[in-house]
Image (tube, coloured by chain):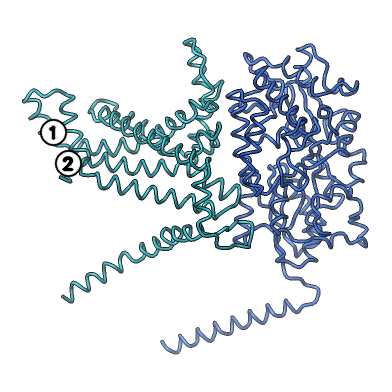
Chain colours: A blue, B cyan
Amino acid sequence: MKRSFSFILVLLFLFCSFGLFAAAQIEETPGVKEPVEFTVGIFGNETHKAVVRSVLDKVEEEFPYISVEIITIPWGEYIQKLSVQKISGDAPDIIWAADVHLKTFMDNGLLVDISSIRDESDTAYDFKDYLPDTLNYVSKDGKLFGIPFSTAPKLIMYNDDLFKAAGLESPYALWQKGEWTYEAFANAVVKITDKSKGIYGYASIFPSDFLMSAIDIIWGYGAEAFNAQNTKFTLNTPEGRKALQLVWDLYNKYDALPTPDQSIGFESGKVAMFKGSTSNFNKMGNVGFKWSIAPLPEGPGDGAIQIGYAAYAVLNDRHSEEDLMKVLKGLTNKAACEAFSKFFIPSRASVINSDTLASQFPLPKEIFSSVVLGSIEKGRVMEVPNNYAQMNVLIQAAIERMILKDTSVEDTLNAIEKDIQEFFN
Amino acid sequence: MKTKVQDQIYGYLFILPLLIGYLMFTVGPLLGGFALSFTNLSILNKNTSFVGFDNYIKFFESAYSRQVVFNTFFFSTGVVTLNLIIATSLALLLEKKIFGIGFFRLAVFTPILTTVVVWAIVWQLLLSSDGIVNQVLLLFGIKGPVWLFNVNTAMISVVVVATLKGVGMNMFIILAALQNVPEIYYEAASIEGVSNWQKFRYITIPMIGGTLFACGLITVIGSFKSFGLIYVMTKGGPMNSTSVWAYDVYLKAFQSFKIGPASASASVMFLVLVVLTLFQWKSRGKWDYNEN
């Protein structure tokens, strides 16, 4: 019994020794790299995931020792899950980060500096192809923390049938004549809305995130929600009051906007105008109405246009920089940007200026070029203070009070200014 | 003597796995959360420092916090009262031994098995301005309000929805208690010519008082922890009229990533619940016939 037990032990020892020796040999074999596994976290849907997969397949094909897993996290839980994963050391290596996420992560020093991707000697990747302005939002103190994959400007998607039924000229036609203003916009909202039929002129203002959803109106009137340093609430100005007055009129004077408990999609055909971007176009496949796009209305302000900004950023530096760059470049090279351009407007000049970009969308090329591409140069990312989530609870309450209790614009702005002051101290 | 000590050791050994789990996963986090309430810990920021009672002072000074506490008490009072009344009434009805009663018992219990998010989404649709509830009211010529976006109706709506979600469990517990009341008491009372109301008041209530007390205690604690319904149905609105304590903790911890203030808010809620529970426990003699 003892002898057979000793024999088994010796066998086991020999087996382990052989395994360790073999492993050491593999490590020492020149040219054979250890497998490296990356994870990429995205907030997109299955269609987006399929495109990311196809792009990553090429990376894996070129560098067989690299494998990349995609983790999909719902948009509503994105930042919470990523933050907790980051703290517990379980976060994806590379993430999709939208404007709000980027700022939060960047300000808290959680992103990895990827400045080495600027390497000009890599002509195949051609970093200079990226529009410099679009990199500002992911740059801090001379370092680079992200590569944008979406710089899609916000625009108005409109239901042409509802405009015709109301006897109104389309927003695009008005824009061509230089008459697409916020007055024309409000006029269309009031005329088209017919609550008895469940039809609304506009359904893109949400008290639950008022500043984000109405920032185009705020900028349109030349106002700012916060100062450049995000240390002060600056909407309580004559321009800000005019912007909020428009919203007040639509809610309280004309009762022309859906109540916040209603969720009406543009695809339903019951909404005449919707603030969207190119990523919304692929939902419009089989809708039973004619639709088109127009730029956001013009106001007395400088006409900055809100950008739906998103970028690849790196949360973990557990792998070598060389391998990280291989994956990151694979996700952001020209071919990848072209693959994504059917959802997002990339910030590579060569892709934006190519004929293939416009052909990806179900719209006449001249409309796409004039509205989408024409808006990019006026594009701007909405930046918010660090404590925005807490401020938003109080801003939401004040806007809801304005809607429910007819509180005046002045009182509403005074209340917001007073309520959120503590977060700037 | 030796056997007694041995028995005690065995006893402790048997409960040891549960005790370890309880200490690690309940007491540990509880004490941890309390300790964190004295810091400015943020999920995203590695620099944490001791801030003393700052988080508590800010909590008590904030008008929003006071509204949250008021809302929580309103919500809890509404849910507990409504729940116990409906659960007792349903238990009395469903106690009857008639054909097909099992189906109705199951129907009342089903919401317990439904996840809170699904329950909340369904009710959100039912209560939307053009939802079924308002469509039915319209048949009678009544224009229903925007239930979940009206300061006067939003809280009442979530109280009713929360009650309907949880009433099945209490109904079953009370039903079991009712079935344990000896029939002989009712028979004796009938011989004495006692009315049905008097039977309920002087026999049923004292006999099931202990159960009602337990149900009340569990429901109070459960209602204080309500989060999912509020998160899905109203997000605390309109005008923060439905923002309850657990939702406030969530906002602070997972929207603003401020763990210190969130822990302070949660610690105050815990202390309030302890005080409420002790108060209820002290007054159990009035509820439970057997305690006397």
Which image quadrant for residue A258?
A: top right
The foreground one among A285 and A217 is A217
How crowded is the residue under tag 1: few (<14 C-alpha within 10 Å), some, or many (20+)?
few
Q: Amino acid at mark 2?
A: Tyr
Q: Residue at x 45, y 85 (%)?
A: A5
Q: Amino acid at mark 1?
A: Glu
The foreground one among B95 and B151 is B151
Residue A28 can be seen, yes or no: yes
> Which x, y percent locates residue B94?
27, 29
Task: Please identify the residue farthest to the bottom as the structure is shown.
Answer: A3
Q: Residue at x 63, y 63 (%)?
A: B47
Instruction: Answer with mark 2 or mark 1, whichever residue precedes in sequence.
Output: 1
On the rendered image, what quadrant is the N terminus of chain A found in?
A: bottom left
Which image quadrant for residue A182?
A: top right
Question: Is A114 drawn above or below residue A162 in the view shown?
Answer: below
- Side (left or right) of A367 relative to A32: right
Residue A282 can be seen, yes or no: no
User: Which residue is denoted by mark 2 in the rendering?
Assistant: B289
How many tags in the picture?
A: 2
Which image quadrant for residue A375?
A: top right
> Which x, y percent locates residue A236?
72, 34
Q: Residue at x 72, y 64 (%)?
A: A317
The foreground one among A121 and A229 is A229
Task: Please identify the residue farthest to the top as the structure is shown.
Answer: B141
Q: Residue at x 51, y 25 (%)?
A: B147
The chain containing the residue under callout 1 comes to B
User: Which residue is denoted by mark 1 in the rendering?
Assistant: B183
